[in-house]
Every structure is written in structure tokens, then in C-alpha cells.
Image: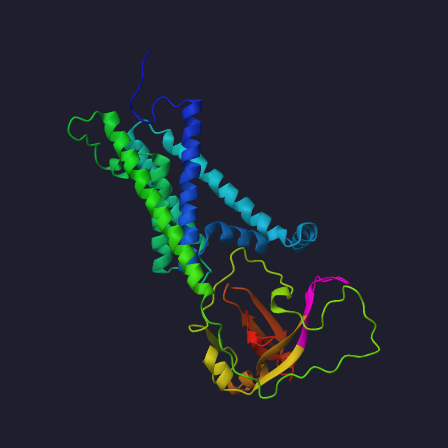
Amino acid sequence: MAVSTEPGSGISARSGRAHFWRGVLGMGAALLVVFTARNLFPLVSFPPARVADLFVRLTPGDLATFMIERLGKGAIRSLGIGVTVVTLLAGGALGVLIGQAQSTSGRAKRALMAALGVFLGSMLLALGTLGAGSLTAALVYGVASIIFAKIAAEVPLLAAVEPKRVEGDETPLDAVMRSRRGFIMRMGLLIAGLVAGGGILRVLRSRNPKVAIAPAARVFDPPPPDPGFPAVPGLAREITRNEDFYNVDINIVKPTVDHTGWRLKIHGLVGAPYELTFEQVQKDFEVVEMAHTLTCISNEVGGHLISTAVWRGVRLKDVLERAKLGEGTVDIVFRAAEGYSDSIPMDKALEETTLLVFGMNGEALP
């Protein structure tokens, strides 16, 4: 019976499964690195979340509505989990492809090519996000891709350009085992450090003081309750608490917006385009406060996609008038941090009750 000591030679079903699970493990480690970095650096997008977001945006409205009606808020979560599982399986497939190489050098070369594909795919998915083209995102994706390649290949990646070195009285097998143990230890320390760092950052963020907002010139004074209105069991309260306010969101990973670096740019068909910081919005215009009810277009009679809050902000018309609106302007278009956009008619934008809001129920807008 001939026994080959060359990695990758004589691929069997058993070794194929081993290569597959190494690929899954490598992709899992890479995703963990990116997910942790996402908590540290908001400009780094999570590739599976981007795929899920694109899928949602490309899904026909009727199908999206059907899934939301059947799964509720779990629809987005289920989609995110499904895309992540598919990504792990894709890593396993790449692991099998890498493991089919008949030499250490060949396996290392295939792993590096796979890493390049993972890196380019991640950068391509980041297009259209706040971090598109950022050096931080490129470094994170690069490190994650190399980690995937190293675990999936299970051989030194430098073997692609250098022969395997054997130290002292080692046999080739001893050298491989030594390299394997050292790599696993280093990877474990790196992943543990990233997880611990992400956890510490979350704790520190949770301890940050709340964002202070300017008071309204006249505080909203709700009218007294109607004594003749019957007490209805289960009736929603008139003012919805922030944590209970209905939410419809297509983002798997919600964008992080730092109010200290946030800017509102007013431009387009205007005579004097300008920008406002979070503080300038509150200082440059009269601050007003009023109660408004919001409802989703998909809300049914008796549904839960409707809430009321006391909003604090400035009149949108004051902000627009400073920009000197041009003739022929029809709509005002709003663009959000994650790329979402919507518009309202000019007549609606200039109403006294249309606000640019920075506060909700006495607190900074969540």
C-alpha cells in the first residue's frame, strides 16, 4: 500500500470533507473578524449584510410584502442568517477547490487566488456605502481574506513562492505539524483579542452620556384627556415611548452615525447651498416641539405600524428658505446615511408642521 505524504494528493471523499470544513472554518473566522471590525469602525460594512440589503432592494414589492406579512420582523433576520450560511458554504466550496491541488505550493497559490477573490468581492459589495473605498475597510477585508486563505489551505501561504523549510532534525511531517500548531495558536489569540476589544468598545459606548439637545422655545403641552372617553383595555397610549415606537427597516446591520461628524447638505436647485452641523441645526433656527403621528403605508386597520411621539426640531421651511429655493422646484429629496432616499412635495415641505427633527420625546433622536 502506497501512502503519500504530500498534502493534497490522492483526494478522497474523507479528505474532501476535511477540506470543506476547513473552508467553512476559514470563512467563519474571516466573517468574525469583519463583524468585530464593524463594531470598531462604522465605515466597514459586513458583506453578508450587504448581499441581504441588495436582495431586499431587488425583490419585487409583492414578494417582499408577502414575506413581511408571513414572518414579520423575522423576515429580515431570517434573510441575514440565510445569506451568512450560504457564505459559509461558499467558503467550504473554496476549501475543496484549494485542497484539490497536488502540492503544497499549488495549494498555497490556490488559497491566495481565493483570498484575492474574497477581497475583491468584499470591496465590490461595499460600493454605495459610507465606507466605500476607505483604507480602513480595505485593510480589514485584506486581513480577513488572508485569514480565510491560511485556514482553508492549512499550509504556509509563502509556500506559493518558497519551498518548505525543515529545521534541525525535523521530518517534513514534524515541520508541518509545528507550523499548524503555531498558526492555530496565533489565530486563536487574534480572534480572542478582536472579540474582547469589540466587547469592551460596546461597553464603553453604552456608558457614553446621552446627546444633549436644545430646549424648545415653547414646550409641547398636551391637551387634557377627554373624561367622556371610555377606558378600553389594551388601548395604546397616546404618546409612544421611544423603545416601543414602530420600526420598519430594510437594513440588516444598521448604519452608525456620529452626531459630531454628521453634516446636513442643502443643495440642488437653490441659490445659496450650504451645510449644517448637528449643533448648528439647533442654534441657527427657532426650535419648536409638537406631537405627530407616523404610520407605515403597510399598516392595516388596527395594526401596530403606527405611533405618536413629541418631536423637537426646526421648521424645514426655515432651513430651505436660507438656501434660496430656485424657481421650478417641485420636490425635496432626502438622502440617508445608508443610501436610502425619499422625497416630499414642495408644498408639504413648506408647511408650518413639517419639521427637521433632532429630538424625540425629550431625548436626542435615536
Residue lying at 37% horizontally and 60% vertically, measured from the top left: 134
Q: Residue 327 vs residue 7: left or right?
A: right
Horizontal side of 61 relative to 200 (left or right) equals right
Position of the N terminus, as image quadrant, is top left
Residue at 53% across / 46% down in the picture? 83
Query: Residue 326: x and y, percent?
Result: 55, 84
Residue at image location 64% in from the left, 65% down from the top: 244
Q: Nearer the viewer, residue 57 or 284?
A: 284
Res 238 quadrant in image: bottom right
Q: Considering depth in this image, is 237 or 345 the residue closer to the camera? A: 237
Can the viewer see residue 104?
yes
> Compared to 284, does 54 lie above or below?
above
Res. 59 in view: no
Res 7 quadrant in image: top left
What secondary structure do most residues of the magenta stretch adopt?
Answer: loop
Q: Is residue 202 above or below residue 25?
A: below
- Quadrant in which residue 61 is drawn: bottom right
Give the magenta-colored segment's residue range.
Answer: 292-307
Q: Residue furthest left?
A: 168
How many numbered discs?
A: 0
- Against 227, residue 152 (above or below) is above
The image shows residue 17 at horizontal and vertical percentages of: 44, 28
Q: Is residue 304 magenta?
A: yes
User: Could you tell me residue 98's position as x and y percent?
Assistant: 37, 33
Q: Position of residue 159 (x, y in %)?
A: 25, 35
Q: Is residue 251 above or below residue 33?
A: below
Instruction: State the quadrant of the C terminus.
Output: bottom right
